[in-house]
Amino acid sequence: MFDKNTNLREAPLISYPLASGDMRFIQVNERIIFLRNDPDLGPVLRGEISGCGSSCFADLGQIFLEFGMNCEGCRDQQSAEAEIAAFGERLGISLVNELSHYLGSQPPQDQLAGVLVCVLNSMDVPFTYLQNPNQLHFTLAHCPLCAAGSKAGLNREMALARFGFAAFCETLVKSLSPEWKLIKPSPHDPGEDLYELEVARL
């Protein structure tokens, strides 16, 4: 697990183009996803725009919604889902690679729990969780993707954001604890609002 005293090397992970809010893709800027050390939460993911400052910060929910807008120019829904899933997988691998410096010799389940706590802290959502030898179950106070969509006016990208976030979480699970499986959100049908995050031992 991580805490606010973790001596974190703040680092950029990946970036993506920011599209305009029109119904067609027009690149207007670039969002860089950083691993930052929040003084209250510890490690978090944060989207930033170079030279813009804190007014342009984006939490992880907004990041997936913004990337969903980038996929609107895909030829069909299947192509859009494949593109945002690839983005989620790439972000997941980058996060695991960076956090591996801090996970040390913790058991795989504790490593996975710590990284999932980082993920939820990156979505600005209160949560509680239950951990036992065969399950990790997080209960969220509200749907963070829904909150981010309402705040940023990106609700039409919600279905794709759910798909990308599920692919991201599945990548984290497979990378850190391949003997575990993502149960919620379902990586195959992440159609419901996000109120739970659950992984279980196979």
Image: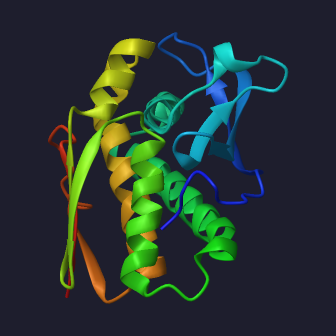
- Tell me if 198 is positioned left or right of 98 in this view: left
- Tell me if 104 is positioned left or right of 85 in this view: right
Between 82 and 190, the residue placed more toward the observer is 190
Q: Residue furthest left?
A: 192
Residue 69 to residue 53: above or below: below
Between 2 and 118, the residue placed more toward the observer is 2
Kindly identify the residue that appears in the image at 33 percent across and 48 percent down: 163
Image x and y of residue 169, in percent: 38, 61
Quarter of the image for residue 129 reads bottom left
Quarter of the image for residue 121 reads top left
Image x and y of residue 107, in percent: 43, 88
Res. 146 visible in picture: yes
Res. 185 visible in picture: no
- Tell me if 26 is positioned left or right of 117 in this view: right
Kindly identify the residue that appears in the image at 54 percent across and 57 percent down: 3
Between 151 and 4, the residue placed more toward the observer is 4
Residue 61 to residue 53: above or below: below
Between 110 and 24, the residue placed more toward the observer is 110
Residue 113 to residue 124: above or below: below
Numbered marks: total = 0
Image x and y of residue 135, in percent: 19, 75
Residue 69 to residue 92: above or below: above
Which quarter of the figure is the C terminus placed in?
bottom left
Kindly identify the residue that appears in the image at 17 percent across and 44 percent down: 191
Image x and y of residue 62, in percent: 47, 29
Kindly identify the residue that appears in the image at 49 percent across and 39 percent down: 60
Q: Residue furthest front?
A: 5
